[in-house]
Amino acid sequence: MEQALDDIASGKGEYKAMIGQAYDQLQGELTAFLKATRKVCPKCGKPMVHRVKPGKGGYDFWGCSGWPDCKEKL
C-alpha cells in the first residue's frame, strides 16, 4: 500500500483505483472479523447487534443489523 501511495504522489498511479482496492480489501477483512468474533444472524448471515433501552418499557435483545429487511432476533 505504501508503494501504491508513493506512485500516486509521483503521478504514476491512480488515486481512485488504489483507494477502491484498499476499501474492498478492508471490507472483506472486517466482514471476516465480525463473523469470527460476533453473533451472526441465522437467517441472513449479517452481524447481530445488541439493542438495549433501559427503564420502564425498555428492551434488551440481539437483533439483526440488516433490519428492517431482516427482523431476526435472538
Image (tube, rainbow, N blue to C red):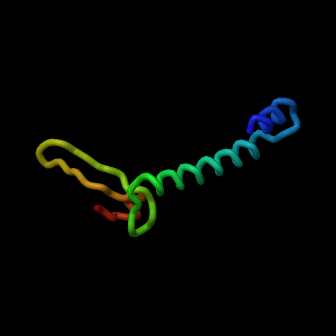
Name the residue at the top extreme: 9
Dividing the picture into quadrants, the one containing residue 4 is top right
Name the residue at the bottom extreme: 43
Name the residue at the left extreme: 56
Q: Is residue 67 left or right of residue 9?
A: left
Is 53 placed above or below 63 here?
above
**Which residue corresponds to the image point at 41% horizontal and 53% vertical from the top-left?**
38
Q: Quadrant of the C terminus?
A: bottom left
Q: Nearer the viewer, residue 57 or 73?
A: 73
Q: Is residue 66 left or right of residue 11?
A: left
**Which residue corresponds to the image point at 17% horizontal and 48% vertical from the top-left?**
58
Q: Quadrant of the N terminus?
A: top right
Q: Is residue 61 left or right of residue 8?
A: left
**Which residue corresponds to the image point at 34% horizontal and 64% vertical from the top-left?**
71
**Which residue corresponds to the image point at 18% horizontal and 42% vertical from the top-left?**
54
Residue 16 image point, x, y percent? 74, 43
Dividing the picture into quadrants, the one containing residue 73 is bottom left
Q: Is residue 60 left or right of residue 33?
A: left
Residue 64 image point, x, y percent? 37, 59
